[in-house]
Image (cartoon, rainbow, N blue to C red):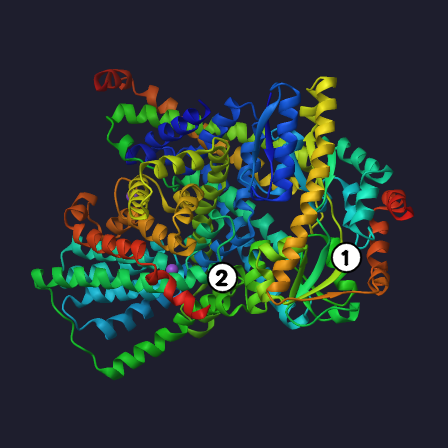
Amino acid sequence: MGLTILLGVFFACVFFGIPVAFAMGLAALSAFWYEGFPLLITFQRTISGISVFSLLAIPFFVFAGELMLHGGIAVRLVRFASTLVGHVRGGLASVNIFSSMLFGGISGSAIADISALGSLLIPVMKERGYRPDYAVNVTVTSSIAGIVIPPSHNMIIFAIAAGGGISISKLFLAGVIPGILMCTCLAVAAYVLARRHGYPAEPFPGLKAVAISAAAALPGLVTAVIIVGGVLSGVFTVTESGAFGAIYALLLTAFVYRTLDWKAFVTAVTSAVRTTAMVMILIGFASSFAYLLALYQVPEILGNTLLGISDNPIIILLMINIILLMLGMIMDMAALLLICTPIFLPIAKSIGMDPTQFGIMMLINLGLGLCTPPVGTCLFVGCAVGKIKIEQSLKTIWPFYLALLLALILVTYVPAFSLWLPSLVG
Amino acid sequence: KDLRGWNIHVEDYPVSHGMEAFLAEVTEKTDGAIKGKVFHGGVLGSQPDAIEQVRLGAIDFGVFSLGPMGQVVPEANVVSLPFIFKSVPDMYRLMDGEAGAALSAGLEAKGIKALGYYDAGARSFYNSIKPINTPADVEGMKVRVMNNDLFVGMIESMGGNATPMAFAEVFQSLKTGVVDGAENNPPSYESTNHFEVAKYYSLSQHLIIPECLCMSKRTWDSLTPEQQAIVAEAGKNSTDLQRKLWQEREAASMKVVMDGGVQVNEIADKSAFQDAMKPVYDQFLNASPELADLVALFQAN
Amino acid sequence: MSTERQDARRHPIILLQDALSNLCVFVCSIMLVVLIATFGWLVFGRYVLNVTPTWVEQLALLLICYITLLGAGVGIHENSHLGVTMFRDAMPQPVQKVVLLLSDIILAAFGAVMFVASIELFNFGWSTLLPMLNIPESFRTLSSVMCGGLLFFFCGLRAALRFSDMFRSTSFIQDLEEAI
Ligand code: NA
Ligand code: NA
């Protein structure tokens, strides 16, 4: 009965448009009330869900991303990408994907990715005769790769949801090849479509131009090197690396590029605050919600059910992926990471899957959910930036879904994609 | 009555077996009038949260380390003083006697009924640089400690660089040199794999912090006197069982780390360490003079 | 729907809410900058001075609570939280208005409970100290009290405005009956 109340209130609230974070809070509050707990437990869980040390990396990553966006680093990265890969057929699509790899690699936030790269590239693509839906679809799906390429605050959320036994630096390393794999799959899809539509290639500007744009972009790329390198070398913890990345981006854009004025700084700080609060309140209420899921032993029940259907690892992973894809359609990434990791990770472990590989699989899977309706934050932002209707994008997005699904399948069933690189470093 | 039990450890751990035995005995002797479930692995929250929930009656019983308990119950800080117990048997004797009773009274005043004091072993230093034989060996070393002024003070009074850090980050930090060392009991040293990256284990046994099997005072008060007697008895029995299991586990862990190539060294004379702790004690008693009697009670025996 | 919002925007109550929301963003922004600066100091202390400032971690955990919970209140005011609005958007206009009113009432009630329960938690935590900072835990719980208050204030007044708007137009009930 208690579980029915928990889930019933949650889905009812979501259905009527109450923000997901508060839907979780309301559901938890109702269930605590039903169980005769003191109501203040709801908020005790929320507060302690927020004040977790490793989560402090999130505001830092988000702030670093905002600084890159408003401080002129993103522009330089795109310029570098277009001199380097603009000359293939449908060149601007490749530029778009490659930029996502570079920029998403740093901001770790798909939404920042889309608003930054989308607002730079989509208008240019439209101007050169690309269909708007094609431009939006490339931007939206390629941003998903940024979630998997380190650093990524969603990796931190996963590590926390997994209970702390997973090393962040291993996750960082594990994401590199799957991220490149995703971009490759997308680039192939984009290339095939570009040939069919007869999209142009940009002229190759010459090696000198590549070198010049690379030199301009390099200091911006160092932000990622600081964050990832700081973690891997062990000079800093993840949180400190995030803080240093942000400080570096601040100094670079303010004093070296001199593109960050006071107004841009204020914009960066205030939007970092808004994004941080949005993500963290979700995490806070999710931890009240997760407390009750644990109390009702949902992980055990669901695990036994799944293992009762089949004990074939291939089938079990397929079922987990399908469940996650369906949940990803209706819910956002951070909440699902927090709720589903404790449920599915033990099952994955029991069939011999490495937790790190499982994490990358989950990130790709839930990333796909970010560009599917009805709840697809990235899709929404992309369509808003490209000024098209969501239906318009959905008609032609399926080749890109297929590309991401292919990457998901490969990462799910071939451990080497995620585990080979970490094994080299040991 | 359906009890909810909180436990931070995994299902197969001395504490966990102790709690299950406690619950089973209570259920059996009350003919099923009191039953419940132990939630292992900290699924119901971290220790500070769970302590709060026990006080509020949301969780009925749990096993808590007296270290973090000090933030709530000042008396509990006394057992976090380095070298307050000379050895583990010394800890058993004191905690089962007058000193332990005084501590239990402090817990009870905060809504926590102590039913027995479990063994959590003795914490010793480990690091990746060299064996520690004298306080001077700690000088300049970056040592991870738990979040507590006493432990920070302990390292600082030996000239080390105390670094409070989330437990989950310690392995990576040891491996990469963010910290040089940490300190813990043998089973934790082994199960966290810290022994793979910090090969020197020096048996300083500086901290012997027992864990407390506690019941929420609200739950306790809701029981009949007969049920209370049953619960208290079951608490004692589970304490005996847990201590025995702990000793076995500790021996097994020591074997694993020694087979793993760890260099373990005894510290023959700990008096230099004990002397170095003088400032820690002074500072502690300065900050909480009301605990002087309790400290004396622990030291007198 | 957008015109309804624009009309509501001009209301003095909304202007007051805007001011409060902006104040929260301002406070949170300063906290974020402090957060980053103290972490710089942490690393400097550990590597250069070889004395780790032990209070940074706990202070950061305190600040993040305020950034999150005050920011969440702002998000409610600015309607920027993630949610599924497609089902609501598919409903007929008058029904949408009722759903929006009910959502605001529910959120306001949630805010009220959060406010009261967090005050209880605030009183309860007075004797528990935050490690290293040695200030009562209540200083952290206060952020939750504030969030509850903000929710109640933002959603409660918005619900009242919606309610008065609704029944100022006499045709509303008729429209609603037709829609159902
Ligand atoms: Na990333
Ligand atoms: Na979706």
Percent position of residue A118, x then y: 27, 58
Q: Are marks 1 and 2 in contact (CB under 8 Å)?
A: no
Please state the total of marks drawn on the protein image: 2
Percent position of residue A280, x then y: 47, 46
Name the foreground residue: A324 vs C177. A324
Q: Are marks 1 and 2 on the same chain?
A: no
Q: Quadrant of residue B114?
A: top right
- For mark 2, name the chain: A
Q: Residues within 10 Å of mark 1 (few under 14, many from 20)?
A: many
**Badge 2 element:** helix
Most extreme residue toward the right is: B300
Asked whether residue A169 appears in the rendered view, the answer is: yes
- Residue type at tag 2: Gly
Asked whether residue A140 appears in the rendered view, the answer is: no
**Badge 1 element:** strand
Q: Which mark is residue A207?
A: none
Name the foreground residue: C103 vs A7. A7
- Residue type at tag 1: His
Percent position of residue B39, x then y: 56, 36
Q: Residues within 10 Å of mark 2 (few under 14, many from 20)?
A: many
Q: Which mark is residue B206?
A: 1
Quadrant housing the N terminus of chain A: top left
Q: CA distance from mark 1 to mark 2?
A: 35 Å
* A353 versus B270 height, above or below: above
Q: In the rendered image, which residue does mark 2 sit on? A: A242
- For mark 1, name the chain: B
Cβ of mark 2 under 8 A from ligand 1: no
